[in-house]
Each structure stands twice: as C-alpha cells, then as structure tokens.
Amino acid sequence: QVQLVESGGGSVQAGGSLRLSCVVSGFTISYKCMGWFRQAPGKEREWIALIYTGSVTTYYADSVKGRFTISQENAKNTVYLQMNSLKPEDTAMYYCAAAGARYVSAYYCSQGSSYDVWGQGTQVTVSS
C-alpha cells in the first residue's frame, strides 16, 4: 500500500525555520518524482519544490527560491523540505506528493501536473 506521511509542521514566528519530512512506503523513492505542494485558505494548491531523485535535479517556485530546500534520503525512503526565513505568507497546508508514473524524467518531474499521489498534509503557520 502506497503511503506518503508528512510531519514537521507547526507554528513559528516570521524569520524562523521548519523542516518537513515525508516518509514514503509502498515504493522506493529512487528514480522518482517527489515534490512539496501547499494550499493556503481560499487559494489553489501550488507546487513549491520538486525533485527528480534519479539525478537530484530540483525545481523551486519563485516564491520560495533561496529560502526552501528539497532533499532526499534514499536509505530512509524520505524526502525533506527545509524551510528558512519563513514569512506569514508561507502559512498553508503542506503536502508531499509523488508522480505515480513508472518511468519518469527530470523534465516530467518539473511539471506540477505530473504528481498524482498525495500525503495527508501538515499545517505550517507563520506569525508576524
């Protein structure tokens, strides 16, 4: 059974940091598309950080570039999102996602629409 389980969310003051974890079961993250998305109240879900784990190619939304880092730990079948210099506008539910396709490429992983396997989400709240 495929499962993506996020953890690490919470409340933090502006300028603070959090690290989100996504533990994957049911498939290995090697040579896969993995990503982090977020959805703020009243807004559409958006991708913020994507990674092709085969070549460790990463992609970031402009809103988080330079502040957030996506990474993988294959031995633990886990993907992380390190979030620094958090801003109140980063407040959202954060979701881990994977592309369910069997064969992927770095380009495929760069497309938010490629992701179709989702975790349950973890809330991040940033106060000013």
Image: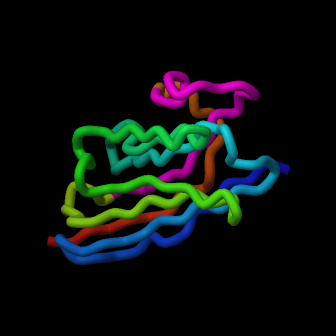
Does residue 4 lie above or below 31 as drawn? below
Q: Please state which of residues 81 and 12 is positioned toward the viewer in this rendering.
A: 81
Read off the magenta span.
92-110
Whole-percent x and y of residue 54? Answer: 61, 39
- The location of residue 50, given as percent across then percent down, is 46, 41
Could you tell whether 77 is left or right of 34 in the image? right
Tell me where residue 90 appears, x and y as whole percent: 27, 57
The residue most toward the front is 55
Badge count: 0
Residue in front for this viewpoint, 29 or 19: 29
Q: Is residue 26 magenta?
A: no
Residue pictured at 63% horizontal, 34% vertical: 99
The answer to whether 47 is drawn above or below residue 103 in the figure is below
User: Residue 21 falls in which quadrant of the image?
Assistant: bottom right
| Residue 113 located left or right of residue 12 | right
Identify the residue shown where x is 44% and y is 64%. Answer: 123
Q: Which residue does the image show at 60% across and 55% down from the upper left?
A: 120
Verify whether residue 106 appears in magenta.
yes
